[in-house]
Image (cartoon, helix red, strand yellow):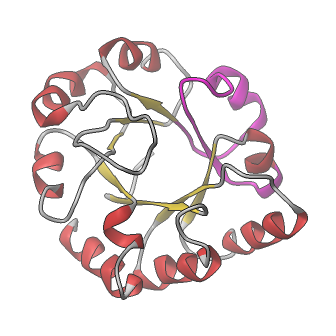
Amino acid sequence: MRLPRFYPILDTARVPDWPEAALDLASGGAGIVQLRHKGLWTESMLEQAERLTRLDPLLIINDRADIAALLGAGLHVGQTDLPPAEARRLVMGPLGLSTHNEEQLWRAAREPVDYVALGPIFPTTSKANPDPVVGCDELRRLRPLVACPLVAIGGITRATATAVLAAGADAVAVIRDWDEAADRRKRVKEWVQLLK
């Protein structure tokens, strides 16, 4: 699979008007969007997520294989979620797995995943209990362990993104540097242009 270099994560807890933010992502040129929703999946939530499948970006659902299967979307799982081999039985779309260190990356290389995420590359405030910082030097050292595309995540900004790509990442996952912008659509366009 070939991932777009800009991999925005849309966290519904951070962005109350997330359906509008999804439109900003689509109209700004994002080729993929991960929808992170840790709360209850109500009927309304499911209907709004279903509308996202009609937009241009590839939709990836965070954690929930059942929701991804219902929507015909991709799935991204963490280390404590449904194991990738089990998730693959449910989901036909792209499957990603979060990793945070060398041991997890080694294990990921043997899983039926389409891409892996590694991080946090830099300190991040988007998670309450983040894993230890990886850094660009460690990213460069670990990159050869997996053949599939690698998404770097954690504290990445427009100022650091090119260094992260130079260290071996195929894409950069971004949360704060686009969702906190006064003009989200414009910021998305800036990201897409930067990472061309």
At 31% from the left and 67% from the top, the residue drawn is 177
**Which residue appears farthest toward the right when viewing the image?**
43
- Image coordinates of residue 4 in percent, x first then y, are 37, 59
Q: Nearer the viewer, residue 117 or 72?
A: 117
Q: Nearer the viewer, residue 159 or 190?
A: 159
Report the number of numbered marks.
Answer: 0
Question: Which portion, as a residue range, is magenta?
Answer: 70-96
In the rendered structure, does residue 92 fall within the stretch colored magenta?
yes
Q: Is residue 158 left or right of residue 192?
A: left
Asked which quadrant contains residue 79, the reply is top right
Asked which quadrant contains residue 1, the reply is top left
In the rendered structure, does residue 128 fall within the stretch colored magenta?
no
Q: In the displayed structure, would residue 22 be above or below residue 140?
A: below
Q: In the displayed structure, would residue 85 be above or below residue 192?
A: above
At 14% from the left and 23% from the top, the residue drawn is 141
Asked which quadrant contains residue 23, the reply is bottom right
- Image coordinates of residue 96 in percent, x first then y, are 52, 38
Q: Nearer the viewer, residue 109 or 138?
A: 138
Q: Nearer the viewer, residue 89 or 45?
A: 45
At 59% from the left and 83% from the top, the residue drawn is 20
**Which residue appears farthest toward the front when viewing the image?**
128
- Image coordinates of residue 163 in percent, x first then y, are 10, 50
Q: Is residue 84 left or right of residue 162?
A: right
In what quadrant of the picture does the C terminus appear?
Answer: bottom left
At 27% from the left and 72% from the top, the residue drawn is 191
Q: In the displayed structure, would residue 117 be above or below residue 81?
A: below
